[in-house]
Image (cartoon, grey):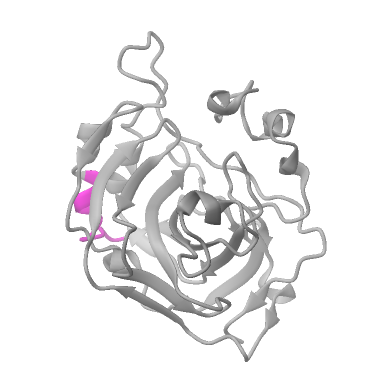
């Protein structure tokens, strides 16, 4: 299975990824099932600080696996620090994972509970590494903030994203998406769990410090439905497959400790 053929179908889905990416069976793979009762409260974890002050979003794209909002990554205007991180990590992009109608689609689970969707804000260690690519392959190169999405009241800030989806319906499409501040996507509490893990899509590099927020963000059923209007395929392809169930199931913990910032 070569690089561009992985996906979420029967033949090329997560259970098959190890054939092309042996690290899929490595010792720090993500996502995981977070069991709050087994998480270790760590008083030395400082609060997470997010400095998303200048909205440097550039575009929104359908990469054939998810919908992605990309950011200018040449300066430190959108960064995360604190918590388990030794230094500042710069925002590169965010994307979502989701399920089919009425089904769960989060990657991390909490005591087996699967949420409808999960948002990943991907940051890289620009203090130590020269590029995102270099950081992505280093053990301390990335920090990903994971936020669960739960069905509830309509989310005001998310409209900007769902309203842009018709422009990126098909794989490989890109549209301008400037001035979006992801701060509006955060829940009120930034209590979190953290553990050493990996990218949840090939190449599955074990380079991620995961910071998974305890509290979900809410969106409406209608907003969630907009995600499922996207396609896994390019416009010119014969078959049309609705983009859904684009998540990797939890991987074995293999002796890792999950730390909690709260009791």
Total numbered badges shown on the rendered structure: 0
- Front-most of residues 66 and 209: 209
* Left or right of 248, for residue 51: left
Which residue occupies the extreme right position in the image?
255
- Quadrant position of the N terminus in the picture: top right
The stretch of residues the image draws in magenta is 153-162
* Left or right of 243, for residue 236: left
* Left or right of 161, for residue 17: right
Q: Residue at 56% of width from left, 50% of height from top?
A: 107
Residue 139 position, x and y percent, is 65, 60
- Front-most of residues 221 and 193: 193
Residue 17 position, x and y percent, is 67, 32
The answer to whether residue 118 shows anywhere in this view is no
Against 51, residue 207 (above or below) is above
Among the 4 quarters of the image, the one containing residue 62: top left
- Front-most of residues 58 and 135: 135
Against 158, residue 46 (above or below) is below
Magenta includes 155?
Answer: yes
Against 166, residue 254 (above or below) is below
Magenta includes 143?
Answer: no
Q: Residue at 39% of width from left, 56% of height from top?
A: 92
Among the 4 quarters of the image, the one containing residue 39: bottom right
- Quadrant position of the C terminus in the picture: bottom right
The answer to whether residue 42 shows anywhere in this view is yes
Residue 6 position, x and y percent, is 58, 28
* Left or right of 251, for residue 128: left
Q: Residue at 69% of width from left, 35% of height from top?
A: 21
Q: Residue at 71% of width from left, 75% of height from top?
A: 37
């Amino acid at each position: 299975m070569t690089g561009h053929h992985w996906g979420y179908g029967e033949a090329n889905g997560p259970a098959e990824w190890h054939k092309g990416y042996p690290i899929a069976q490595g010792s720090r793979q993500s996502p995981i099932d977070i069991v709050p009762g087994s998480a270790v409260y760590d008083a030395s974890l400082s609060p997470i600080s997010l400095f998303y002050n200048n909205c440097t979003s550039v575009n929104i794209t359908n990469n054939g696996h998810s919908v992605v909002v990309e950011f200018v990554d040449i300066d430190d205007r959108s960064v995360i620090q604190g918590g388990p991180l030794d230094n500042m990590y710069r925002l590169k992009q965010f994307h979502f994972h989701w399920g089919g109608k009425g089904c769960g689609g989060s990657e991390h689970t909490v005591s087996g509970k699967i949420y409808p969707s999960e948002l990943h804000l991907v940051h890289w260690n620009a203090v130590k590494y020269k590029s995102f690519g270099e950081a992505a392959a280093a053990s301390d190169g990335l920090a990903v903030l994971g936020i669960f999405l739960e069905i509830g009241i309509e989310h005001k800030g998310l409209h900007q994203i769902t309203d842009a989806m018709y422009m990126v319906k098909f794989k490989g499409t890109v549209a301008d998406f400037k001035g979006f501040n992801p701060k509006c996507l955060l829940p009120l509490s930034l209590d979190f769990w953290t553990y050493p893990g990996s990218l949840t899509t090939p190449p599955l590099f074990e380079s991620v410090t995961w910071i998974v927020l305890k509290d979900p963000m809410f969106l409406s059923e209608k907003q969630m439905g907009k995600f499922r209007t996207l396609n896994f395929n390019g416009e010119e392809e014969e078959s049309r497959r609705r983009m859904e169930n684009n998540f990797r199931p939890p991987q074995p913990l293999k002796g890792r400790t999950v730390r909690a910032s709260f009791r």
